[in-house]
Amino acid sequence: MKYIEEFQNPDLAKRLLDEIHATVTRPWALMEVCGGQTHSIIRHGIDQLLPEQIELIHGPGCPVCVTPLEMIDKALEIASRPGVLFCSFGDMLRVPGSGRDLFQVRAAGGDVRVVYSPLDALKLARQNPDRQVVFFGIGFETTAPPNAMAVHQAARLGVPNFSMLVSHVRVPPAIEAIMCSPDCRVDAFLAAGHVCSVMGTGEYPELAERFRVPIVVTGFEPLDILEGVRRSVRQLEAGRHTVENAYPRAVRPEGNPAARAMLADVFEVTDRAWRGIGTIPGSGWRLSERYRAFDAEHRFSVEDVTTLEPAACRAGEVLQGLLKPHECEAFGTVCTPRTPLGATMVSSEGACAAYYLYRRLGGTPVPAAGKEANPVG
Amino acid sequence: MCLAVPGRVLDVEERDGTRMATVDFGGVVKEVCLEYLPDLQVGEYTIVHVGFALQRLDEESARRTLDLFENLGLLEEEFGDPWEAAASEPVVAAGSEPAAAAPATATATATATAAETLTREVGR
């Protein structure tokens, strides 16, 4: 059991691992949905501590990675327009569109600003009434409520020069799409903890029942992930398929009702394209009719942007768990964090970035960055 | 940006009809919107995502997570300067051939170097 001493509570980690090892009798594939979980797994070598029969498959849980190229090209187009002040989270700066990224747009004279919160973008709009301030609204159910609040406040305070380029995505339809794929080999899901902090667990029992797949709500600390794996394996070995909450300190069954109410007011469910995966029915949000005036896509007429996806990038297969990053020919050669072909390599939550960062190149694993391994057990 | 960071509420006030707080994230202090957790009080811990408090957290869990994030360099990633990080990278158009790709040698030194580079590259 290498690297276990890096865990916050090595004794507890050892106990969880011992139980997992003792429980497993057959091969199982578990998909972790959250990109933060992927990084924690690779960083701590959790996949290598588990029995050989257990495979962890990395799911589409990085919001930057799944944002479709069309939407990034629309962002670049809007950000290049005169009089526009374009706001984004920092993660998006180096995500390549068809030919450039936001950093390059800024270098060419575009006014691109990084904000920590969508409310900062709204503040900029109020401070610059002569400019069009556009916020790039991406993310899963964790990020959608804050972005919804910014639009709600813009309407309440009457800020006409604020708009949002909306590309929000929802986890449950993605799980459904993965389970419906003929290539699917997922036996259980580790559901994303912070998505459930907002949405609760109510969307999952139907999925667990329909696809006979255990869904365990899991945090992203090493012990959280081991506990999620332990519970998943216990269900699989017993032939059960229910929803369990292994992250109760941050997830209540009802989620956050105030945030969910705001989501229901500001957004409505729509079909959404996922980068490399394609369109998944009902998998996204767009602004509801009441807030349509704040939709940047309409305000700037960018519906017909054409895109050019790099042929060598296999991020779509990585996002669906069909390919491990190091199995891609471009990984670590043509495609690196300095020269990314796709968002999975450049995003801080991307699976390819995790493999590159922690040198999972398909050969002998090396302990996490900058630390020496002191194998125990 | 998917990261949700625990923090401790330092004070609460009404601004523009919105309940706001200042929250301490292990030394970094940020303005946080409390509209989704309106009854949060000074001294309590909460999970904050992109400037919004989303759930309460007990003090022990919050402190443990903050320690972990600090050790992993995630706090710097969350609150550091993304322009500085992006500026340290060469400009490469999507789909073009890079001039020199990093060799994939799995040595401890290369690991540390690559990790340091990537921390700058993906940090924000």
Image (cartoon, rainbow, N blue to C red):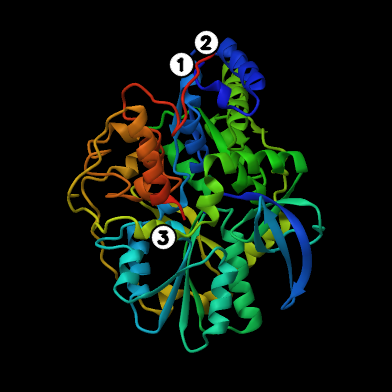
* Front-lying residue, A208 or A344: A344
Mark-to-mark CA distance, 2 and 1 = 8 Å
**Residue with the mark numbered 3:** B84
Residue A124: % across, % down: 54, 78
Q: How far apart are marks 1 and 3 (CA)?
A: 43 Å
Q: Residue B51, relative to residue A244: is it above or below? A: below
Q: Name which residue lies at 24% across and 56% down.
A: B92
Q: Which of B43 and A185 is in front in this view?
A: B43
Disc 3: host chain:
B
Q: Can residue A323 be seen in this view?
A: no
Residue at figure coordinates x 26%, y 59% from the top left: B91
Q: Distance between the residues labelled 2 and 3?
A: 50 Å
Residue A294 lies left or right of residue A158; in this view the side is: left
Position in image of residue B18 (x %, y %):
73, 72
Q: Residue at x 39, y 84 (%)?
A: A83
Residue A16 placement (x, y as % from top left): 63, 19
Q: What residue type is labelled 2?
A: Thr
Residue closest to the far bottom = A130
Q: Which mark is residue B53?
A: none
- Mark in front: 2 vs 3: 3
**Crowd class of label 2 (few under 14; some 14 to 19; many from 20; radius 10 Å):** few
**What residue would you read off at disc 1?**
A53
